Image (cartoon, rainbow, N blue to C red):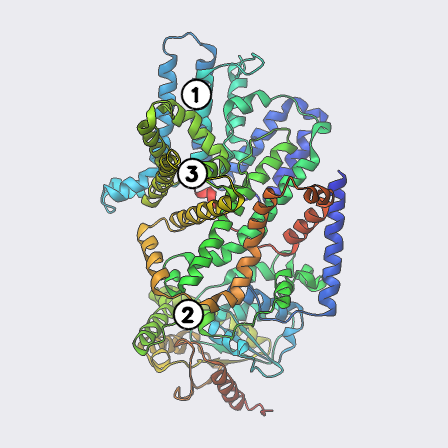
């Protein structure tokens, strides 16, 4: 079920109405959980059963870990849970890759592995489950000293089911950590809804997705093989820029809608994007792009590996491990690993150069740094768009051999690509001037901007496409 | 809550202003941002903006669309050629329209193919007919993107130019290779004979239903380069058309000699050739030329 489908609007609206009825106040978690199961099971009931089994097993393990803090087998329970979850993820996500790479496709096991369906959002909910297990193992209470999970086993199962399956964030995040979400589970009241904040998030999110990402998607479809072979080099570079804007608008849009919807139900999710394309370094980029994944990898992988506390060589190795696994998390294809290694290498190189070179703080220098980071990040997205590595090579060949024509930039297509890409870039520029006096004065009229965004959603929608991150 | 109320108000005012603007100064057709949108624009115009008043309709693929894009279609003619689509789409649109043309010219070059159903779904079903009939601002042609484009000082694409169809090599050897590639791509859906024949049979049933309603159906094959028009694939399709599509109630217009016709990419006629071919069709239909 897509966020931009009529059935989703009906589900979210109906759930919202029931949720705040006084009569159902004690059943709020039940209502949201039921809606989440409908949301997930809408397209495949079989994959819903996998999700339920996964949550039931992990819920039981987490409950034991939380309520028996001194038990000698506690570590074993957590380890079992982590191995089990990673095993399930590996089986469903990487089974087909293993089937293709190791086994013959026409024999029984190879064909079976290739036929395994990829459960929607498995990468995201596996990270939620792992977060739950590890958080209750590390510290079983929240900031106020209350236990993260209720003493009642079934209530605990329900809370965990709700945390993992909560529909706005189930299939593509943001990846909210258990210790941030579980303490929020309590009775919610209609009077506490931050309507304006939710409105801003939802309108901006739908605009980014439905107007910018979906329209750009109509052009970036030419960035696939073999269509790309018939494009000129200049057209291909323009399409790559468009894809860079599309992937931001698509994922940031999804995250904003999720955050806005959660606000309507009284829950706060962490911000997932913080103007990533103004980053002047790769480290800064990863603090601004898909923040919930970056912080998850930092908290549960980079820091336990030793982070930067064990000398420069181990730091570089840790960076490469984290980014490689981060790349591999995105998909079962060589190009995702190369993408992870590419970013790991850039981070390591940047760190290495940073110890020898100190650039002066100047706006012009920062501008060129931003351009460099944006350019290299955009180049990296090619590995997302073309997961088959040979197609990436075909793209490179086409760019250099099909010629570069200034006339291409005077075509109608260019106008449309710029029309849908520029708002993404302007959105980032607005961040740079957010503290200026003029901006603060103009901000009083933000309702005009939101009116324009609504106008765009109404009259300038693209053809609805799946969210790019659904495939992960 | 004030921000929400004011934003909604601004949106409503903008929609009203925009509606007035396109009512005062209608946007030119043919500047859609993609092939699919170009098709939707054509369907919208046919169903909701008086296009179905046409006496003669051409249904087909991008080959028939090229006749429209050339700008040489005479008054009273309408081309429901769908870019990336096929004849079935045009026939379905004619069937969905309450008003039927007197003559339907069916392009048979790709009549075995089923494609482009999406546009029809999006245009003909659900709330769309009501919305698009009474609120022209929701028609494809009137998207604000097209309005912005009309303010932009860049030239419109020459239909069927190299620019619109991508990178076309300049030298003769490469051009021939590209032409062979495009011809191959054009016929790539011919592999599954059973599906192709099923599509033709279904099309025949649709055409017979239209013939029952008084529409005169003519089967035509639009010319291209010699290899495209007279090659083995074209001969196979002719055989299929004779066997599975032709009926005693339909008429056929013979394909003219391809020698005077020029194409932009081996398959699509260039603008002068479109004019030439349209005149040929008019002579065959015995419609007096202007």
Q: What is the crowding at mark 3: few (fewer than 14 residues within 10 Å), some, or many (at least 20)?
A: many
Tell me: residue A157, above or below residue B37. above
Q: In front of the other: label 3 or label 1? A: 1
- The residue sitting at the front extreme is A360
Query: Can you give x and y, in whole percent of width and height, for residue B262 in the image?
Result: 42, 83
Residue at 59%, 26% in the rendered image: A30
Give the SS element for disc 1: helix
Confirm or deny contact between disc 3 and disc 1 (CB under 8 A): no
Residue at 56%, 72% in the rendered image: B155
| Chain at numbered mark 2 | B
Q: Is residue A44 left or right of residue A189?
A: left
- To the question of a shared chain for discs 3 and 2, the answer is no
Residue at 71%, 25% in the rendered image: A23
The picture quadrant where one finds residue B230 is bottom left
Q: Which residue is mark 2?
A: B112
Pick the front one: B25 or A343:
A343
Query: Can you give x and y, in whole percent of width and height, for residue B140 in the image?
Result: 61, 63
Give the SS element for disc 3: loop
Pick the front one: A441 or B129:
A441
Tell me: residue B111, above or below residue A364. below
Q: In front of the other: label 1 or label 2? A: 1
Q: Which residue is mark 3?
A: A119
């Amino acid at each position: 079920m897509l966020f931009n489908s009529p059935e989703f609007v009906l589900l979210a609206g109906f759930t919202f109405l029931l949720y705040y009825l006084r009569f159902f106040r004690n059943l709020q978690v039940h209502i949201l959980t039921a809606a989440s199961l409908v949301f997930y099971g809408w397209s495949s009931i079989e994959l819903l059963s996998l999700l339920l089994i996964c949550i039931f097993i992990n819920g039981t393990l987490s409950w034991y870990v939380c309520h028996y803090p001194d038990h000698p087998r506690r570590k074993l329970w957590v380890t079992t849970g982590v191995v089990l979850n990673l095993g399930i993820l590996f089986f469903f996500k990487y089974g087909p890759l293993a089937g293709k790479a190791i086994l013959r496709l026409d024999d029984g096991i190879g064909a079976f592995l290739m036929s395994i369906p990829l459960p929607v959002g498995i990468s995201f909910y596996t990270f939620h489950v792992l977060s739950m297990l590890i958080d209750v193992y590390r510290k079983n209470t929240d900031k106020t000293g209350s236990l993260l999970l209720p003493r009642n086993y079934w209530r605990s199962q329900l809370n965990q089911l709700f945390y993992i399956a909560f529909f706005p964030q189930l299939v593509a995040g943001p990846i909210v950590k258990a210790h941030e979400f579980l303490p929020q589970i309590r009775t919610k009241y209609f009077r506490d809804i931050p309507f304006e904040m939710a409105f801003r998030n939802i309108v901006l999110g739908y605009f980014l997705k439905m107007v910018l990402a979906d329209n750009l998607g109509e052009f970036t479809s030419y960035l696939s093989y073999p269509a790309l072979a018939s494009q000129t080099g200049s057209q291909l570079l323009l399409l790559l820029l468009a894809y860079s804007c599309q992937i931001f608008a698509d994922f940031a849009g999804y995250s904003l809608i999720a955050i806005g919807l959660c606000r309507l139900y009284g829950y706060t999710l962490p911000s997932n994007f913080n103007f990533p394309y103004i980053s002047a370094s790769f480290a800064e980029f990863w603090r601004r792009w898909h923040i919930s994944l970056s912080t998850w990898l930092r908290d549960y992988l980079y820091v336990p590996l030793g982070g930067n506390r064990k000398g420069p060589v181990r730091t570089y190795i840790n960076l490469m491990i984290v980014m490689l696994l981060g790349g591999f998390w995105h998909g079962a294809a060589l190009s995702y690993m190369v993408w992870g290694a590419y970013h790991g290498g850039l981070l390591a190189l940047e760190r290495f150069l940073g110890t020898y070179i100190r650039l002066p703080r100047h706006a012009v220098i920062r501008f060129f740094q931003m351009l460099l980071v944006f350019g290299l990040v955009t180049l990296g997205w090619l590995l997302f768009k073309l997961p088959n590595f040979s197609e990436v090579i075909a793209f490179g060949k086409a760019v250099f051999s099909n010629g570069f024509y200034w006339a291409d930039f005077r075509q109608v297509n260019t106008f449309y690509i710029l029309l849908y890409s520029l708002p993404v870039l302007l959105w980032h520029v607005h961040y740079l001037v957010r503290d200026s006096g003029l901006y603060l004065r103009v901000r009083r009229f933000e309702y005009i901007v939101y009116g324009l965004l609504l106008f765009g959603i109404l009259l300038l929608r693209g053809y609805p496409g799946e969210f790019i991150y659904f495939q992960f | 809550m004030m921000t929400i109320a004011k934003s909604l108000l601004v949106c409503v005012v903008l929609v009203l202003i925009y509606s007035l603007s396109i009512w005062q100064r209608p946007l030119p057709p043919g500047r859609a941002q993609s092939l699919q949108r170009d098709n939707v624009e054509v369907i919208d115009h046919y169903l909701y903006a008086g296009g179905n008043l046409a006496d003669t309709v051409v249904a087909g693929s991008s080959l028939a669309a090229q006749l429209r894009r050339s700008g040489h279609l005479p008054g009273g003619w309408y081309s429901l050629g769908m870019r990336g689509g096929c004849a079935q789409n045009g026939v379905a649109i004619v069937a969905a329209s309450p008003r039927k043309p007197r003559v339907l010219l069916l392009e048979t070059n790709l009549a075995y193919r089923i494609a482009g159903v999406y546009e029809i779904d999006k245009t003909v079903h659900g709330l769309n007919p009501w919305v698009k009939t009474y609120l022209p601002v929701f028609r494809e042609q009137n998207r604000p993107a097209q309005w912005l484009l009309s303010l932009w000082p860049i030239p419109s694409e020459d239909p069927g130019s190299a620019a619109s169809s991508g990178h076309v090599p300049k030298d003769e050897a490469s051009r021939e290779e590209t032409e062979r590639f495009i011809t191959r791509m054009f016929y790539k859906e011919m592999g599954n004979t059973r599906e192709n024949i099923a599509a033709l049979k279904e099309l025949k049933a649709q055409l017979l239903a239209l013939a029952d309603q008084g529409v005169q159906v003519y089967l035509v094959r639009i010319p291209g380069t010699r290899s495209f028009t007279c090659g083995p694939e074209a001969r196979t399709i002719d055989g299929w058309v004779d066997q599975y599509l032709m009926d005693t109630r339909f008429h056929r217009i013979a394909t003219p000699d391809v020698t005077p016709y020029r194409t932009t990419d081996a398959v699509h006629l260039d603008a002068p050739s479109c004019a030439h071919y349209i005149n040929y069709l008019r002579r065959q239909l015995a419609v007096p030329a202007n």
